[in-house]
Image (cartoon, rainbow, N blue to C red):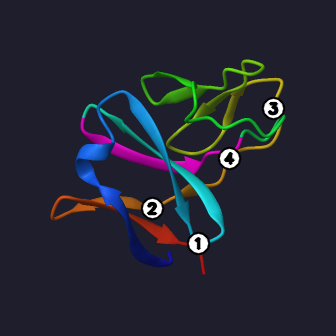
Amino acid sequence: MGEFVTVGRADEVGDGEAVAFAVGDEEVAVARVDGDLYAFSDICTHRHCNLSAGGEIEGTTIQCECHGSMFSMETGEVLNPPASEPLATFDVRELEGEIQVAVPE
């Protein structure tokens, strides 16, 4: 696990939403579902669409609006093609009203 960096305020990510943040050289989406936070690459591995910009969240999965690929926000696993490569996932936490994501080493 890398070092945690603050990316935004906790109130920036509502329940059932995903918001993109720049974390080092990565575009990371942070989603909140039932109070739990998930952080994963914001870029779909199929055609490089931004998942936070219109991706549909259901439970702990997100579906890319471009071509319908579905991913687990917990593990990055592809749950439905056409994507075949998983998303990178990141450790995330909420601390004193801020969202923090672990930057890969």
Mark before the other along the chain sequence, 4 or 1: 1
What amino acid is found at the position of numbered circle 4 in the picture? Answer: Leu
SS category of the residue bearing label 1? loop
Above or below for 2 versus 43: below
Residue 59 falls in image quadrant? top left
Q: Where is residue 53 in the image (x, y as percent from the top left)?
A: 58, 32
> How far is the residue under mark 4 from the one under mark 1?
17 Å
Q: Where is residue 55 in the image (x, y as percent from the top left)?
A: 58, 26
SS category of the residue bearing label 2? loop
Residue wearing tag 1: 24
Residue wearing tag 3: 83
What amino acid is found at the position of numbered circle 1 in the picture? Answer: Gly
Residue in the picture at 35% in, 46% down? 37
Mark before the other along the chain sequence, 2 or 1: 1
> How far is the residue under mark 4 from the one under mark 2?
13 Å
> How far is the residue under mark 1 from the one under mark 3?
25 Å
Camera-side mark, 2 or 1: 1
Q: Where is residue 65 in the image (x, y as percent from the top left)?
A: 67, 20
